[in-house]
Image (cartoon, rainbow, N blue to C red):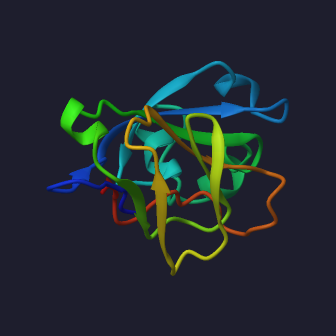
């Protein structure tokens, strides 16, 4: 998934994001845990890198550890720091490769619900926006939600 901030030139939001699980359904061992996540990337890779799960593709690990990623709402969070010049420009978030079932919020307000992983989502936002959150919520009936992003996120 790619997320860009508009301006000249585009600003990539790839790199470090904060990842956490919310909701009563979260596995107890990950409640109140904040993980350093990488975009582009995916939830399973981030959980493995944080030492929360073992290699998911080894033997039966995918099945026995699925409680970690199938329960609760997983959220990727990024604080933006637009320059004074960028704050004067028009801004958009561009998502390429976002997994279906994602709820995208800017400064706490829902701006998009991604229901098709093969679409490019272009979302106009205030150029002074400071927080982008991408949540994979249990109440959305989308299958295969553990893959967060595959191509990167950029701010345009």
Q: In this view, does 140 lie above or below 86?
A: below
Q: Residue at x 59, y 40 (%)?
A: 75
- Residue located farthest toward the front when viewing the structure as drawn: 88
Q: Is residue 69 above or below residue 19?
A: below
- Name the image quarter holding the N terminus: bottom left
- Spot occupied by residue 138 in the image (x, y as percentages of width and height): 79, 51
Q: Is residue 40 above or below residue 68?
A: below
- Left or right, residue 15 beside residue 148: left
Q: Which residue is drawn at 22% across and 32% down?
A: 83
- Spot occupied by residue 119 in the image (x, y as percentages of width and height): 51, 79
> Front-most of 85 and 142?
85
> Front-most of 8 and 146?
8
Can you tell which quarter of the image residue 31 is in?
Answer: top right
Q: Residue at x 21, y 56 (%)?
A: 10
Q: Residue at x 65, y 18 (%)?
A: 32
Q: Can residue 68 be seen in this view?
A: no
- Left or right, residue 14 beside residue 133: left
Can you tell which quarter of the image residue 149 is in?
Answer: bottom left
- Residue located farthest toward the bottom when viewing the structure as drawn: 118
Q: Is residue 72 above or below residue 89?
A: above
Can you tell which quarter of the image residue 82 is in?
Answer: top left
């Amino acid at each position: 998934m790619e997320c860009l901030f508009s301006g000249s030139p585009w600003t990539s939001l790839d790199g470090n994001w904060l990842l956490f699980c919310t909701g009563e359904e979260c596995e107890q061992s990950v409640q109140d845990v904040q993980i350093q996540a990488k975009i582009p990337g995916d939830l399973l890779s981030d959980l493995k890198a944080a030492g929360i799960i073992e290699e998911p593709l080894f033997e039966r690990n995918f099945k026995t550890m699925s409680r970690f990623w199938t329960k609760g709402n997983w959220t990727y969070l990024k604080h933006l720091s637009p320059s004074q010049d960028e704050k004067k420009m028009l801004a958009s978030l561009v998502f390429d490769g976002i997994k279906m079932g994602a709820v995208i919020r800017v400064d706490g307000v829902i701006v998009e619900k991604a229901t098709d992983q093969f679409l490019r989502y272009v979302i106009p936002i205030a150029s002074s926006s400071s927080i982008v959150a991408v949540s994979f919520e249990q109440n959305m009936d989308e299958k295969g939600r553990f893959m967060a992003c595959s191509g990167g996120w950029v701010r345009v």
